[in-house]
Image: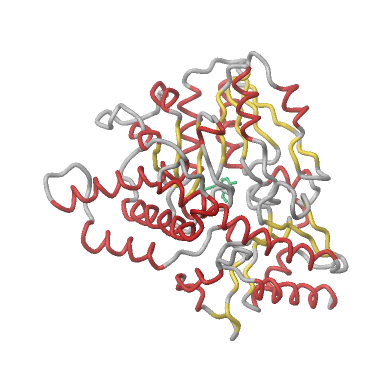
Amino acid sequence: MPVDLSSCREQFPAMSCQVNGNPVAYFDGPGGTQVPKSVIDRMVRYLSSQNANIHGEFKSSRETDAVIEEARERVAVFLGASKEEIAFGANMTTLNFALSRAIARDLVPGDEIIVTELDHEANIGPWTALSEKGIRVLQVRVDTESCTLDMADLESKLGPRTKVVAVTYTSNAVGTINDVKRIAAMAHEVGAVCVVDAVSAAPHILIDVRDIDCDYLLCSAYKFFGPHVGVLYGKREKFRSLRAYKVRPQEDFHPEKIETGTLNHEGLAGTTAAIDFIASLGEPFVDEFAPGDVPEERGKIIAAMRAMAEYEDALLARLMDGLSDVPGLKIYGLPAGASRTPIVAFTMEGCSPAEVARELGEKGLFVWHGHFFALTLIERLGLAEKGGVVRIGIAPYNTAEEIDRLLEAIRSLASGR
Ligand SMILES: Cc1ncc(COP(=O)(O)O)c(C=O)c1O
């Protein structure tokens, strides 16, 4: 029996929204997924009865301490980490700027950092900003045919001066999955740390920071059914020596030392609930998909990610198959079945990406257009001046019927040009 997760959509209040009498189909997940009611309820509960600042001698403050602790524990299970390795912040970009500045305190002019053309600007800008300190930033080329990283180019750029390799786990524009385990090993061979951007990977791929053996990894809960909260994993021994910029009374140990100011407590309550939601998707598949020797909570996450991948891959194949014979359409990146997440980028002859998104949006089919901050890739594809691409993202709340509706609308748009 193929995995069918579509009934989970009943848990998402947003599924009842309409545009011009059409039910909304959310294909905008890579920009941020919809949120189940359990997450919304958990945030409301926090704000209704637990709202306080931390470390006080009264009930709501103690409960707030517990909310933060619980979020660290849950995210640790989600990423295969330990809770003292999990820090929170406003979003991934803000945390990555804090990380790059902290790492840079121990760098000297002439040191080198490697970034890639496939990355979102959030994992490029914080590193290129360090060039004002005399640090050389090198960029690994992308092969524009396949939208994959040129691994030989990465190899040639690594050397004794390399201090950081910053790479995305998956492309948020075209879905390519990078071999981050191999890249982390290559970085370690020259004594560099590896920073992985897992923002677009976390909703689709089981993350195991121990297996990847990266030193830092970042993601954002709003991409996996949660609220707007950024997450930073730091390998214990690296995190311990990291010289984060912090105010004097702030804790001096990890992970708190990189958490500037008051956290988004209600967001953390929602983040815990988002991971519980994911675990609930995995529960029926634990015997089938999770190895017997992992703790129960991790087993549910493993099973959920496997189930989501199977479900989403089937929808992706249906979508890509349907798009393949639409006249005037160019699809970017790897074919279905290759090492990719369920994100499809395309352009349509005679119709700009913004026009396509607007037309589809009027029919209740929400897709993104533009460069999504994967600006270098879009430039390398020669699309920066042409409005970028249209991006379709698939989530567990999407259905085969929605894919068919989308295909029909795209076909009708293409034939009417
Ligand atoms: C791959 C990737 N990295 C980083 C980011 C930035 O994340 P945040 O919005 O949490 O700063 C995004 C956002 O879309 C993304 O897709």
Q: Name the quarter where the C terminus is drawn.
A: bottom right
Residue 268 placement, left or right of 332: left
Answer above or below: position of 77 versus 386: above
The residue that appears at 68% across and 35% down in the rendered structure is: 116
Q: Name the quarter where the N terminus is drawn.
A: bottom right
Query: x, y percentage for residue 245?
Result: 38, 29
The mark total stands at 0
Task: Write down the quadrant of residue 346 in the picture.
Answer: bottom right
Residue sitting nearer the eye, 128 or 413: 413
Query: x, y percentage for residue 100?
Result: 51, 30
The residue that appears at 58% across and 38% down in the rendered structure is: 123
Query: x, y percentage for residue 381?
Result: 79, 47
Farthest residue, direction top: 160
The residue that appears at 27% across and 28% down in the rendered structure is: 248
Q: How is the image coloured?
A: secondary structure
The residue that appears at 84% across and 69% down in the rendered structure is: 326
Query: x, y percentage for residue 11?
Result: 45, 70
Answer above or below: position of 187 versus 22: above
Task: Write down the quadrant of residue 26 in the picture.
Answer: bottom right
Residue sitting nearer the eye, 221 or 293: 293
Residue sitting nearer the eye, 121 or 342: 342
Answer above or below: position of 31 versus 89: below
Farthest residue, direction bottom: 21
Residue 286 placement, left or right of 85: right
Task: Write down the quadrant of residue 400 in the picture.
Answer: bottom right
Residue 239 placement, left or right of 354: left
Residue sitting nearer the eye, 413 or 210: 210
